[in-house]
Amino acid sequence: MIVGKLTKICTLLLLGAVLVSGCSTTAKKTEASGSPDPSSSPTETESQEPIAIPKLDYNDKIVLANNALELEFLTIALASCEKAQKDGFTATTGDRVSYFRPAEEGIFPYWPFDEVTVKNGVVGPAAYQNYYPGFLSPCDLELQGREWNYEIDDVRLEHKVILNSDGTYSWYQHFGGSSMDEFVYQVSNGLITRYGVFKNLDTVVGYGPFTSEQNSYFDKINE
């Protein structure tokens, strides 16, 4: 009986060794080839679907407007963004002018612009590399309200509009924090012309089309 048990144990050990050896051999072959298992790799006929970048349809209904004042301001903001996406725009702060030209992809995923900055006559790279200018903030929130699967009362879409005594609009929304932050916008002829924080309208907005000289700035930065 003991011999029989030992025989069974030896047989099981031998079988386990064979299996381990087989797995080790397969792993070594895969490692040596430097490529994954062909069964898990895409075939040559397969193609990945391009990532669809959401864009605002300016003819669609505004979804974030909760009252007449919000509708009034968002209509102005969207008209400004539409003009900017068609003809380009500038953001001037002090002696620095940033030029934003419409592009297919651009520096901001959902707001396709190329950007150059001119300061003291010198053309340089984009100043807004990690965040888009506050000029686009109301439009960006409207885009989120339309495209993402948020309920309209989701805290991420929370916002507020106040009409100030000087005719400017205060726009409040969340910028990554729990409280809402304020941007103030000045409007002329139905378009945003200045904006800033804490009622400091330190950024002047201009619109294209750009001149041939202004367009040449984008070529200079790539030289």
Image: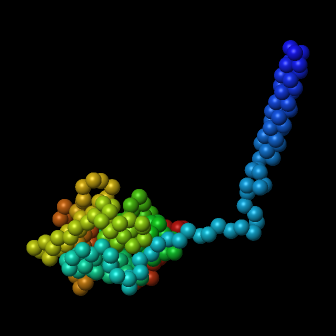
Tell me the quarter of the picture where residue 108 sits.
bottom left
> In this picture, is 14 found above or below 70?
above
Residue 67's x, y, as percent? 21, 76
In this view, the residue in front, 5 or 79, is: 5
Q: Nearer the viewer, residue 214 or 34?
A: 34
Q: Does residue 61 show up?
A: yes
Picture layout, residue 9 above or below residue 27: above
- Left or right side of 181 for 129: right
Where is residue 15 shown, x and y percent of the image?
85, 30
Quarter of the view holding residue 142: bottom left
Coordinates of residue 185 in the picture (x, y in percent): 23, 72
Judge left or right: residue 211 versus residue 163. Answer: right
Q: Residue furthest left?
A: 165
Q: Residue at x 28, y 64 (%)?
A: 158
- Identify the residue shown where x is 65% and y is 67%: 48
Outermost residue toward the top in this view: 2
Taking 152 as reference, is 176 above or below it? above
Indicate the position of residue 211 as horizontal and vertical percent values: 41, 83
Question: Is 147 left, or right, of 21 in this rendering?
Answer: left
The outermost residue toward the front is 1
Q: Is residue 217 visible?
A: no
Q: Is the residue 47 above or below the residue 213 in the image?
A: above
Q: Residue at x 78, y 55 (%)?
A: 38
Q: 143 or 119: which is nearer to us? A: 143
Please state, as top left, top right, bottom left or bottom right, where the N terminus lies in the image: top right
Q: Quadrant of the C terminus?
A: bottom right
Q: How is the image coloured?
A: rainbow
